Image (cartoon, grey):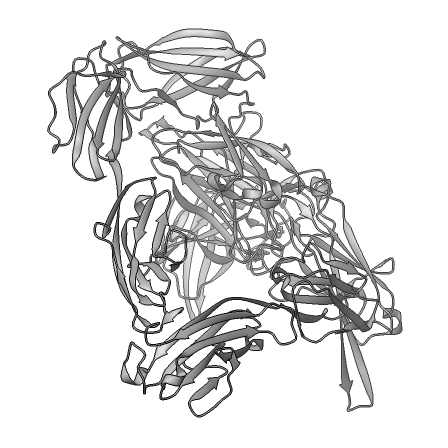
Amino acid sequence: IVAQTIISTHTHTESRERITPCLILLHYTFALNWTCHLLFGLLMAVDSLRAIRVQDMLLEIKEDLESIASSYLDTPVLTVHQTISDVRGSYYQEKTVFLRCTVNSNPPARFIWKRGSMLIEQSKDNGVDIYEPLYTQGETKVLKLKNLRPKDLADYTCQVSVRNVCNIEDKSVTFRLTNATAPPMIRLSVDDAVVVDPGQDVVLTCEVIAGFPSPNVTWTRYPGPLPLSAQVRGRSLTLRAVTPSDAGFYNCTAVNNVGNPARKNVNLVVRTMNNLTFQITPDSNKDSETIQMGRDLKLSCHVDATPQDKVNYTWYKNGALIYNSDNLILLRSDPDMAPGTSSLEIVDMKFRDLATYSCVANFPGSRVPELRVDVNISQNSVSPPVLTVPPGSQVVSVREGGVAELLCMIVDGKPRPPVLWSRTEKDLLMPSGQPVVETPDGRLRLRNVTRDMMGAYRCQTAPYNGLNIKRREAQVQLNVQYSPILDPVFQDVRSRNSQMVTLRCTILRANPPRLTDIRWYRNGEIIRMPMPDLKETPELKFKLEPLNNGSYECRVSNYAGTSSCTFNVSAKPYNAEFYFDTPNPVRILKGNNYSYNLQWTQKDPEATDRIIGYWINVRKNKLNQLVKQIDLRGKEPEKGVLMTYTIPDLQIPVSYEVRLSPITTFSTGDYVTRIIQYSEPYTYPRPTDHVCGFEDDRICGFSQDRSDNFDWTRQNHLTQNPKRSANTGPDTDRSGTKEGFYMYIEASQPRVQGEKARLMSPLFNETLYRGPKGSGRMPYCVSFYYHMKGKHIGALNVILRVRSIASVDSMVWSKSGPQGPDWKKAFFDVSPSGPFQIVFEGIRGSSFEGDIAIDDVSITTGKCKQENTVASAGKTGKIERRDVKIGSLCRDVSGHRTAVGEGRHDGSNLKRSGVSVVISSLFLQTHSTRINICLILVRILETNIAKNHYSRLILSQKQTNHYSRLILSCPGTYWHQVSQGHIVNSCLTIRPFPSLLILLCASFI
């Protein structure tokens, strides 16, 4: 990969701000999504941060660390829950108490329970049970007291710890459990709903009637917080001079951490009344739009009020109160109208019914002012409205950013209703964000018009404050004019000298589309040229010379305005682009100096004149330390090919600023700058350090994979968490010392099954080697110790990652399930085809007893040497007991299987004394249907056996009653074929049975 992010990692407690320098170094060959890895592996997009500043390639990110996974430990919350159950009928009852402790923290907290000052251990007290509830992620622990005993009435403490991360101290909470412990109960001094007038004072009291310890009472409001005028005194809430904005649900909550909190709600309603409207509905059965004698007529009245159902409507005729009669019918709530609408129906209208009708709306017994509307009913006072758009106003044109006025006039009709405006497209809202806008006179004024507002607008008569008949409507088209939209807005054009350059300015959209002018400028001065065709795409062609480099601008105009395309035309070469993934660029020199291997690529080297060299400038504290021209000696840069220069004689541990610029025959390119920093060079494995025991905090150049789920952890016996999970993980390192370190994965919460942690070795630059049979791949021996103790062990995989154009992973070793309490050694050979890394992948098992550890990792050139573990048994003829690995199968990624396990060989099948046969190890490996049994070492421990004597090792396959005996013979310690099977390089190949049992025995000829 040719892009990497270097971050200065800081660990902080929450609620503190810090400016974190995140230096992002980019190589041009890859398009990147600009992101920054923050604390604890959190990936956060740059544009989501609260404040950023970019200057000189330094990206400063300012963020409240509470919003990015910082280290913290909140105060725990301890709640108590009690249950009482009948046992054996109703003779006696059992009381069970659950103490639930919850805390928010990062990293996950460990819990400790105490009764008084004594630690509670589940294994030592049958009356308690400690567990984690379902559907929690390690933030909750429950202490269950079964069948409450007298000694259980005590003080209980829940102590939480994040193991002193960021110097965060442990926190605790204590609860006193007594016989009087009871959950809270409350009642309110008012009803569930309280209706008041604006300006009144309201007092709400929450009375506690039960609960021990004494509950704490709080008041809240939904929606929103308590009003600023609210006063809480004790258990009472007082609201002074309430307004409609104070309305809502007020909640009283009593908490004493016993049982569930007690809650009561009060709905506070503040009376409001506004917007009284009326409707005149002619006889709907006759489809009439006018008032006619002998037909029915309905007058309706509606007011927007809170509460709507408490509004009282009163009707008057010429000032006299109306009562129900044969031809005047009052409807308190008209089912044909909107809810809360009152109607007066006039049946078989007569001349005596022509009058002024009044509708009055009020709240009985309230100080809210009443509202009144008068409707004059006569033959000449009511007529249908006529809606029209004035001539020349059907289409309104306006420039973008201007003011537009849309007109839709009611020229006739009594009474004249308001005009409602909306967009003709169903899904589009009005510029105000509302679906409908009401105008009293039909004039819709739009300010700061944008092209998004362009389109058709509908105007309609409102169904209220006039005749309730078929709505009249019309349309007005809004046309927004804007200057041409061009592409490109800016373009950097590079070319060789004496070559033709074509600049093209494409017109994407324009309104109006007809252009009025096209002009070209160079460095601000107009270029004299014939008037271009306004219907063609603007183009400018010219031959690039050293004197006509510069800024070219194409200005395109229409009646709405002018837009421009800008081109920066130059024969200067593109800048170089640093490569930041150079493996181990530092080399130590004499005299406390170092050199730095600087690498870069040249962006588009063929775009301009030939690059003949580079200027390099090395500065310390803004003072030049080195200014030099790098001569390419006729070698032309190629696109994507790394170029190298070693900067000598740099002082340890000083950092330097390096500036690099390409040079052509005619010009010099722009400088590109980077900072080089001293870091201790590390070539793994070191000649004097073939084994990495992770004793140094730099862990031998190993690194964590950022694409996994969690990380490996370095620790030893002295840094172990004393509260760690029992029955899993090593107590010491591989050598058995408490001070020795190792790497391990922690399987406790919040880890879940299947999550992976990957630890990557440094990058090895694989090279070909020459042997007696020609060139070939260099073999490497990988060896390490692993520890996989615990009933929930997942898997440990070793992956060979070969890096080329893309990384290729292949699994070369794997182990899963519990492997016993001891450290075990594994080793194997790899022959990578390119630069490679060894990746240790730990996979979390089904639960928390699944810690996996590795130690003493070695990656050396050459094939692994088989270890000789034979111990001489002397001349007594006795056989020393040895473990023989013949165990269970596990699959690797290539389809092969490696048998590793435990077996015993005690020499009981020897036919003749005086011969000792010790098998140090046996590997079983299947390729498809064959098993290769490799006898690593078999030695006859008898000094008086002549070299022409032979021993015979008999291997028997047993499946049910079927036996096949394979006999091998060896002179001294070297095997060769005697009868069945085929042996090559001390390996016997046989056909396996579905169930294979290997029996080992030895005899002497």
Query: Who is closer to the viewer here, 972 or 991?
Result: 991
Q: Residue at x 44, y 87 (%)?
A: 328
Question: In the rendered image of this protein, does residue 290 appear above or below residue 454?
Answer: below
226 to the left or right of 152: left
Query: Who is closer to the viewer here, 86 or 814?
Result: 86
Q: Residue at x 80, y 81 (%)?
A: 94
Question: In the rendered image of this protein, does residue 904 appear above or below residue 25?
Answer: below
Query: Who is closer to the viewer here, 434 or 113?
Result: 434
Residue 961 shows in this picture:
no
Q: Residue furthest right?
A: 150
- The spot of residue 388 in percent (x, y) is 25, 59
**How many circles with numbers are drawn on the protein?**
0
Q: Residue at x 67, y 58 (%)?
A: 226
- The spot of residue 745 in percent (x, y) is 59, 48
24 to the left or right of 140: left
Tell me which corner region of the image, top left, top right, bottom left or bottom right, holds residue 136: bottom right
- The spot of residue 625 in percent (x, y) is 50, 7
831 to the left or right of 548: right
Residue 429 shows in this picture:
yes
Question: In the rendered image of this protein, does residue 514 appear above or below residue 244?
Answer: above
- The spot of residue 424 in percent (x, y) is 28, 59
Q: Residue at x 39, y 34 (%)?
A: 1
